[in-house]
Amino acid sequence: MAKVEKLSTTPRNQELYEKFTYFIKSATVLLKKRHGDSLPITESIVPEKLKEGGWITKLKEEFEFSGTIYDDAESISKLKEAKNLADLLLHDEMTSRWVGAPRDLNGSPLGKKETYLYIVQNHLSKPLNRYLKETEAYKFNKNICANIYQEFENFLYSDAETFTIIAPLGGFRSDSGGLRLDENLLIRKITLEEHQRLFKDSGGTFPLFEPGVMGMTHVIATYYTRKISDAHNVFPSMDLFKKVITALRIFKKGGIGFTRIYDKPDHWMSPFGFGSAARHEHLRYLGGNYELNNSEIPNFLNFWKDFASLDQKKYRFLDIATERFYLSQERIRQPEDKLIDIMIGLEALYLRDNKELSYKLSTRAAFMLEKNPGKRKKIFALVKKAYGIRSDIVHGSKLKKEISVDGTKMNIYQLADESEEVLRSSIHLFINLSKEKSEKQINKILEEAIFASTS
C-alpha cells in the first residue's frame, strides 16, 4: 500500500489520518467500479432574486453523492479500510465520544456487521460525500482529502458543536441589515441558503403554501452550543422567539409573525442536518406588513431592553397583560376572542379588586393614558363599551352588527382594533412605571387616578 502523504499541519492523530485516507481511496475505487464515470446529478427548483426586484425560479443542477453512498453503504462497510477506520473511531478516546456505542431500536448492542454499516451510514458518509462533491469524480486527490480530514478531525476532537437557529419573519420590513438585541440574539437579513430552504419547504412552486414567503427579508437568529456530554439535543425554548415577536407587536401595530423555526448545525459533520423544528409551537403570520424604519430602531432597542429585563414575577400584572396581548394577535380572525384577551389584559393592569369593575377600568385607563379631556372621554367610552361587549360575549348574548361608542358606529372588528391600541399604550405606560415604581406605588397611582376623575 502506498505511503500516505503527511499534512502541512500535523494531525493530532496520525493513525486516524492514515486510516481516513486509505478509506477515501478504497471507497472511491469501489464507487468507480460500480458506476464508472456516471456521476449523480440532482435537479431542484430554486428561487433567484432579480436586481430590479422580484423573484424568478430556476432549475438548479448539482452533484449529490449522498444517495449513491447510501445505496452502496453495505458494500462500502465491507471494505477492509472502512472496518479499520470504524474500529479506530469506536475505540479511540477522543473520537468514541461522538461515535458512541451503536445500538438497535431496543437498546441492544449491534453485531459487528451491523456496527460497520452504522458507522458508514452515520459517520463516514458525510466526509465521503463532501470529498466527492469537491473532486466531482471517483478519483483520489490527496490535497482535497487532507483538507476534508482536517475538518473531520477538528469536529471529532471538539467538545461541543454549535447551531444557528432562525425564525423567518413574515411581514417584516427594515432598511437595517440587522438589530442586535443581545450578545446571542439578533434580527438580521435572511441568507440565500435560508431563503431557498424556506422556498423548498413551502412546496417549491408558485403559488406558495406559506403566505409571503418570497417577500421575507429578515430572520430572528440565535446560536446554541450542544456539549458532547448532553444526553439529548435540547434547543433554546420557543419562548425566546415568542418574546421578540411580542415585543415587536407591542412596540407598534403591524402584521408580523413566523411559521416555523429552523436549526442548522455550523459543521457539516454534525449528525443533525438543516431542518425545520416543527416540534415547536408557531406564531402564525396571517398577513399584513410591519415596517421598522431606521429612525424607529433606537426607540425599539430601548423598548426591548426594558421589555426583556422586566421582572415578570415581581410585576405579575404586566406578565398577564403581555401574554394576553400576544394571544390577541393570534386571533385576528376571531374578533370576539381577541376582544376577550385584550380586556383581560387591561383588567390585569388597571384592576386590583372586584368592585365597580367597568367604571374603575374605564376611568383609570382614560386618566392614566391621556391628559386631554376630549381624548380621555373617548378612551373612557371605548373601554366601557368594550368591557360591556366582553361581558355579553362570555355570557352568550347575541352581538349587534353595529356598535355605538360615544356616537361613533363600528363593528366588532373595529372595536377590537381600537381596544388593542389602548392595551398597547397601557403596556408601554406600565413598563415605564415598573422601571422606577414598586407594585405598591403603582397601585397607589391607580387609586389616585380614581380620585382625580371626581375632582
Image (cartoon, rainbow, N blue to C red):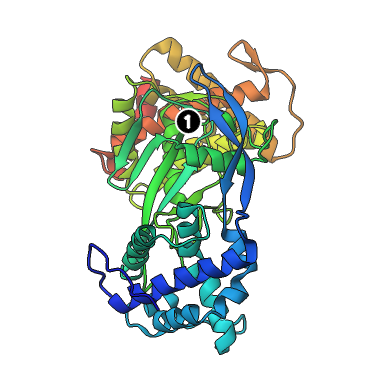
In the image, taking residue 22 as reference, residue 113 lies left or right, namely right
Q: Residue furthest front?
A: 2
Residue at figure coordinates x 35%, y 70% from the top left = 156
Residue 227 percent coordinates (x, y): 35, 68
Residue at figure coordinates x 34%, y 45% from the top left = 185
Residue 234 percent coordinates (x, y): 45, 63
Residue 386 percent coordinates (x, y): 59, 27
Q: Amino acid at mark 1?
A: Thr
Quarter of the image with the N terminus is bottom left
Residue at figure coordinates x 53%, y 73% from the top left = 120
Quarter of the image with the C terminus is top left
102 or 231: which is nearer to us?
102
142 or 275: which is nearer to us?
142
Determine whether 134 is above or below 357 in the image: below
- Residue marked by disc 1: 217
Determine whether 39 is above or below 403 in the image: below
398 or 8: which is nearer to us?
8
